[in-house]
Amino acid sequence: MLIYDAHSPAPRCLRMFLLEKQLQVPAVTVDVMTGENRQRPI
């Protein structure tokens, strides 16, 4: 599983949940303010 992380409320809740459960999941940080989430994947 790969998590796409951003600085917004929903991903923050997920990060908190994972920390509480002591789970480590790989994550990629996406900058939604610059529209990185709207670009086509390579």
Image (cartoon, helix red, strand yellow):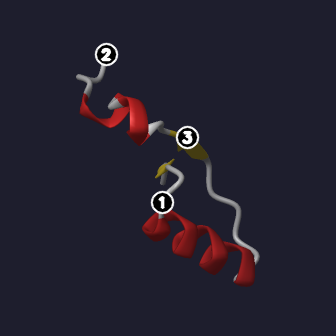
Quarter where residue 19 is shown: bottom right
Q: Which mark is residue 42?
A: 2
Instruction: Identify the mark nearer the N-term, 2 or 3.
Output: 3
Front: mark 3 or 1: 1
Q: Which mark is residue 29?
A: 3
Residue drawn 39% across and 29% down? Answer: 34
Instruction: Identify the mark nearer the N-term, 3 or 1.
Output: 1
Separation of marks 1 and 2 at Cα, in angstroms: 24 Å
* Left or right: 27 as drawn, with respect to 24: left
Separation of marks 3 and 1 at Cα, in angstroms: 11 Å
Q: Residue furthest front?
A: 33
Q: Which residue type does callout 3 highlight?
A: Thr
Q: Which mark is residue 8?
A: 1
Marks 2,3: beta carbons within 8 A: no
Report the front residue among 15 and 25: 15
Above or below, comparing residue 31 to residue 27 in the picture: above
Report the front residue among 25 and 9: 9
Front: mark 1 or 2: 1
Q: Secondary structure at mark 2?
A: loop
